[in-house]
Image (cartoon, rainbow, N blue to C red):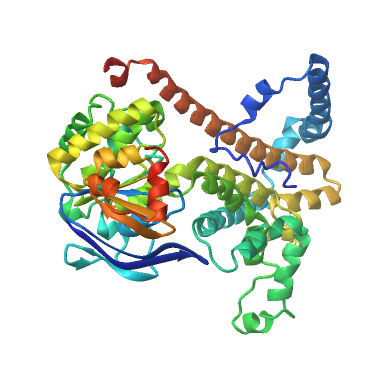
């Protein structure tokens, strides 16, 4: 699930892959074989399912496909998905920056434990992530009686789904930032400090701009996972269509109700959201490279140093 | 501005980086901290800047006790070995940074900031580069930008941590001469850390030799070379003289 995140080489750190390929060039047959294997794997496991989803969605014609999105319950599930993501992603953005900052800038007791805990949601099954909140806030949970006495509904309601999603998407921002900030060190922050800048100014003018691409990348991953999460949310949601169903849960319901065309239509919408995030990410990387190359070009103009002895 | 340090001690875990160091630096002096790596000279410089905090002892800027003051209150100009320029900002914004973050009441107007940045670029002989980014400059140019950035806020003291350490021999010598002339002209109290004896003896009015976190010898270059030395100082100076 997390294997596609390159934690050691997040965007924003200088990418060594290009140079590596040139330095260790393999014989032609080896390269062809490797590329062939990768392409075959890619087709079988990534491209084909995506095509099937869209094919399934359009199997009964465009009319049926579009009519799925006039269904009130389905539209509601899209809303719920967006709402959950809109709360969970910013929460994890703030947490991610704070955690990455604390872990890379300070040496404190329990630092290793915190580092390990950040990864926890990646180790455990998302279902457990959901169960934690049922055990905590459910009717028979530790906080259950108190919550009931105050008429607060968490489990089988939106708050529980937001909590579960936040839990599952917890590591993405922090994990994209930690190696990046570790590599960048804190000399620029120290320089800013000696120039009289306060903590907030340093965060705003130095740290955030320095980590913006890695941060953006983490946000996109976090968002993609928040919208696509099934296991954790399915435990804490009452799964009432039109009430507490997110898109993935709605897809399951439609599928179980033999409404294949609608199920695939929602699935394709979810896939489109994923493709959209993917293109946003590519756009960000492309923009980053463009800026860098523009900088490189102006290097060609004569500098003062080449004019002076 | 004069600086006085009284029995300053700083340990990292069990390792005593700076061990009971007392030192007085007069206004307008250029003092070199010389010693092998791990001798505590950089830690002492960082303690003076406020980038580290001492376990024991006190630091005075003139009469003011700054021991517990943070780096952004002390505002000692600090130049890092690896320049530590803000890579996402243009050269202009790098130099202007300290002026832009000043409290509103003391902040200069936009025109005044521009004026000061351009005049600093002229001082370091890099006029015309204000729209470049740090990655587009050579090492020597970057280090001069780092100087200008530190000088922009008109610090009362300049702290240089191995300022020429990452540069090649030729640029090193040029910048060293430039720094000497700059100090002659401005008489800005300056401390610099180096492990290069030639550099220390050529540029500094006074040299402080460190080993294992303690001062081994203090004096003008002549005094260091001639006066009585302990075994460490004799060995250290014999290395390349």
Residue appearing at x 65%, y 81% in the figure = A148
- Left or right of residue A8, residue B38 in this image: left
**Residue B130 falls in image quadrant:** top left
Say if A182 sits above or below B113 in the image.
Answer: below
Residue nearer the viewer, A8 or B27: B27
Residue A74 percent across, percent down from the top left? 69, 49
Residue nearer the viewer, A187 or A98: A187
Residue appearing at x 66%, y 21% in the figure = A22
Residue B102 percent across, percent down from the top left? 23, 52
Residue A248 percent across, percent down from the top left? 73, 50
Say if B74 sits above or below B151 in the image.
Answer: below
- Left or right of residue A98, residue A85 in this image: right
Residue B67 percent across, percent down from the top left? 29, 67
**Residue A135 falls in image quadrant:** bottom right
Residue nearer the viewer, A224 or A21: A21
Does the rendering let one see residue A276?
yes
Does the rendering let one see residue B141?
no
- Left or right of residue B109, residue B214 in this image: right
């Amino acid at each position: 699930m997390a294997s596609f995140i390159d934690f050691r080489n997040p965007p924003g750190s200088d990418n060594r892959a290009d140079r590596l390929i040139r330095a260790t060039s393999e014989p032609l047959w080896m390269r062809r074989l490797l590329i062939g294997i990768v392409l075959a794997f890619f087709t079988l496991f990534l491209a084909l399912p995506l095509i099937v989803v869209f094919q399934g969605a359009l199997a009964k014609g465009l009319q049926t496909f579009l009519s799925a999105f006039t269904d009130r319950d389905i539209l509601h599930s899209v809303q719920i998905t967006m709402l959950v993501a809109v709360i969970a992603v910013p929460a994890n953005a703030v947490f991610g920056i704070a955690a990455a900052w604390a872990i890379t800038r300070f040496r404190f007791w329990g630092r290793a434990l915190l580092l390990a805990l950040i990864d926890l949601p990646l180790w455990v099954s998302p279902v457990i992530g959901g169960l934690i909140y049922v055990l905590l806030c459910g009717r028979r949970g530790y906080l259950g009686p108190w919550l009931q006495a105050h008429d607060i509904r968490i489990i089988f309601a939106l708050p529980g789904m937001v909590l579960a999603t936040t839990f599952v998407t917890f590591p993405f921002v922090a994990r994209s930032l930690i190696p990046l900030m570790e590599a960048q060190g804190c000399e620029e922050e120290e320089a800013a400090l000696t120039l009289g800048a306060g903590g907030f100014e340093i965060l705003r003018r130095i740290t955030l701009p320095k980590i913006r691409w890695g941060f953006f990348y983490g946000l996109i991953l976090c968002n993609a996972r928040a919208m696509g999460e099934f296991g954790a949310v399915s435990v804490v949601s009452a799964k009432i269509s039109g009430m507490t169903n997110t898109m993935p849960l709605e897809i399951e319901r439609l599928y179980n109700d033999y409404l294949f065309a609608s199920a695939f239509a929602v699935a394709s919408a979810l896939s489109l959201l994923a493709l959209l995030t993917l293109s946003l990410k590519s756009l960000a990387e492309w923009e980053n490279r463009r800026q860098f190359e523009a900088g490189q070009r102006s290097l060609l103009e004569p500098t003062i140093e080449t004019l002076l002895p | 501005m004069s600086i006085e340090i009284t029995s300053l001690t700083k340990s990292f875990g069990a390792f005593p980086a700076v061990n009971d160091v007392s030192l007085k630096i007069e206004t307008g002096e250029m003092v070199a901290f010389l010693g092998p790596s791990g001798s505590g000279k950089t830690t002492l410089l960082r303690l003076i800047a406020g980038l580290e905090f001492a376990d024991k002892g006190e630091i005075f800027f003139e009469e003011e006790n700054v021991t517990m003051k943070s780096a952004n209150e002390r505002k000692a100009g600090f130049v890092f070995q690896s320049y530590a320029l803000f890579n996402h900002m243009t050269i202009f914004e790098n130099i202007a940074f300290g002026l832009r973050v000043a409290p509103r009441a003391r902040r200069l107007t936009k025109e005044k900031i521009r004026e000061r940045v351009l005049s600093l670029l002229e001082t370091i002989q890099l006029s015309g580069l204000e729209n470049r980014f740090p990655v587009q400059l050579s090492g020597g140019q970057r280090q001069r930008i780092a100087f200008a950035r530190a000088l922009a806020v008109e610090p009362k003291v300049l702290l240089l941590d191995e300022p020429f350490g990452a540069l090649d021999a030729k640029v090193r010598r040029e910048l060293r001469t430039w720094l000497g002339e700059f100090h002659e002209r401005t008489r800005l109290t300056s401390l610099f850390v180096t492990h290069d004896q030639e550099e220390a003896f050529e540029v500094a009015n006074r040299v402080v030799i460190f080993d294992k976190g303690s001062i081994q010898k203090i004096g003008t270059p002549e005094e260091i070379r001639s006066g009585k030395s302990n075994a460490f100082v004799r060995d250290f100076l014999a290395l390349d003289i």
